[in-house]
């Protein structure tokens, strides 16, 4: 079969690889009908996530049709259309029983790597390195889905792949980021990053009742989409003042009650001194992540507020203004998304027409076009916001 594989930093190829097979009675095999390139995949492409090996199959946003079912799987049958959450969950451990799906205690087959990095293992993830279990990803013609009697979301007839696909990651990620803010009707929510996750953060914050949402980025087409969704916008390339001062100006001195960092490890701020230092450190292997957006969110958040971090970080962060967080009494909430905590509610919202997640898609192509589109997405060329691939 064809699959998109990692061959080193910046080197993504469409390879011919062996078809997957059933390995456990709870498994299913799906024929991929749609998959997407996620911003988190760019962290792999750019070398920010460790424990990648040549030939690893990428992709954690995917869906398809069940074509083979393990003998012990009573949930699914051949012919079912399913979206597969990016987190692999056993459904039986203490964390799964609490609904903390992204920190399942059993599914990371390389638990020792995660323990070295994080102190404890986290859940296995599709297509996301040997840090999270070395599971083959979904940017492939066929995918083995382990523990498939737990997480896959059965999609009803009449809902298109493009409407359903993002239930596996970025829609619930944006929703959880907003939910972590405990939004109140008077809240002003500031969101750093208007990429795909940021767009769903905007939609989710407004759906959850925020009074105002202010979105911060420097990519014109992303800011335009944010504005269409109902957000006020700040293009940080056009600002002489700091984002903190601009937020105060826009809100009559009130500022942001809740702040969301939807950027993560690869902040592309250009003019600030801290961002320049981050970039130099990363290039010379003296640092891992570039947390300019997180620093800005902590500084901009009002006392007593919440900073929510759906943006992915992989290592150690430098010069975080923790004194500001502590002295302002901020709450910081983060984590990989507990997809199944939200999936049924969000599926219902799509069915009822409250949101059509396909609004985010700008590029549609075949799997073999994936390597070129990885570069297009990373470099923000051709007004690219979200890529969806089919076999």
Image (cartoon, rainbow, N blue to C red):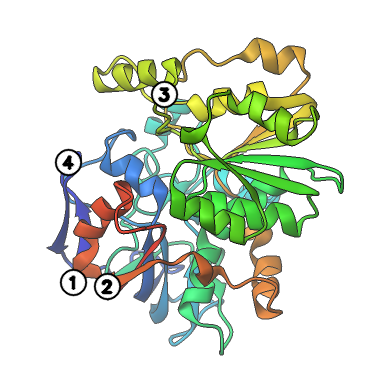
**Mark drawn on residue 141:** 2
- Crowdedness of circle 1 by 10 Å Cα count: few (<14), some, many (20+)? few
Instruction: Specify whether 158 is left or right of 231.
Output: left
Q: Residue 61: x percent and y percent? A: 42, 61
Q: How far, Cα to Cα, is label 1 from label 2?
A: 6 Å
Q: Position of residue 18 (x, y in %)?
A: 17, 66
Q: Tell me the quadrant of the picture where the C terminus can be found.
A: bottom left
Proximity of marks 1 and 3: CB atoms separated by less than 8 Å:
no
The reply to whether callout 1 and callout 2 are in contact (CB within 8 Å) is yes
Which numbered disc flags the more N-terminal residue, 2 or 3?
Answer: 2
| Res 315 → quadrant | top left
The image's mark for residue 137 is none
Looking at the picture, how far across and down is residue 245, in whole percent? Answer: 66, 24
Q: 388 or 361, which is in the foreground?
A: 361
Identity of the residue drawn at 48% across and 50% down: 195
Task: Return the residue at label 1.
Answer: 1
The residue positioned 60% from the left and 14% from the top of the image is: 321
Q: Secondary structure at mark 2?
A: loop
The tag earlier along the polypeptide, 1 or 2, is 1
Residue identifier under label 4: 8
């Amino acid at each position: 079969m064809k699959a998109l594989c990692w061959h080193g930093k910046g080197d993504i190829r469409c390879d011919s690889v062996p078809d997957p097979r059933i390995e456990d009675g709870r498994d299913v095999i799906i024929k991929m009908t749609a998959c997407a390139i996620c911003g988190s995949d760019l962290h792999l492409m750019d070398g920010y996530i460790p424990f990648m090996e040549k030939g690893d199959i990428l992709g954690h946003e995917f869906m398809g049709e069940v074509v083979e079912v393990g003998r012990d799987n009573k949930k699914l049958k051949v012919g079912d259309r399913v979206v597969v959450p990016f987190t692999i969950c056993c459904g039986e451990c203490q964390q799964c029983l609490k609904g903390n799906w992204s920190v399942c205690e059993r599914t990371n087959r390389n638990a020792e790597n995660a323990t070295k990095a994080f102190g404890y293992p986290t859940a296995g993830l599709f297509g996301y390195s040997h840090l999270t279990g070395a599971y083959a990803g979904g940017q492939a013609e066929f995918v083995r889905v382990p523990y498939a009697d737990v997480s896959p979301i059965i999609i009803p007839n009449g809902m298109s792949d493009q409407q359903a696909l993002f239930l596996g990651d970025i829609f619930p990620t944006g929703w959880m980021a907003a939910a972590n803010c405990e939004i109140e009707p008077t809240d002003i929510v500031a969101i750093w990053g208007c990429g795909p996750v940021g767009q769903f953060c905007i939609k989710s914050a407004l759906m959850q009742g925020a009074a105002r949402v202010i979105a911060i980025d420097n990519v014109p087409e992303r800011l335009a989409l944010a504005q269409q969704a109902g957000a006020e916008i700040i293009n940080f390339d056009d600002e002489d003042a700091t984002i903190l001062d601009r937020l105060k100006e826009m809100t009559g001195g009130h500022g942001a009650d809740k702040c969301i960092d939807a950027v993560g490890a690869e902040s592309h701020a250009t003019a600030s001194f801290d961002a320049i230092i981050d970039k130099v450190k990363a290039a010379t292997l003296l640092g891992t992540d570039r947390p300019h957006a997180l620093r800005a969110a902590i500084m901009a958040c009002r006392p007593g507020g919440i900073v929510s971090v759906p943006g992915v970080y992989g290592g150690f962060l430098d010069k975080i203004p923790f004194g500001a967080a502590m002295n302002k009494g901020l709450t910081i909430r983060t984590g990989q998304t507990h997809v199944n905590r939200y999936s049924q509610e969000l599926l219902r919202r799509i069915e009822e027409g409250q949101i059509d997640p396909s609004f985010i898609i700008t590029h549609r192509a075949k799997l073999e076009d994936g390597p070129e589109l990885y570069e297009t997405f990373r470099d923000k060329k051709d007004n690219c916001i979200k890529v969806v691939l089919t076999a």
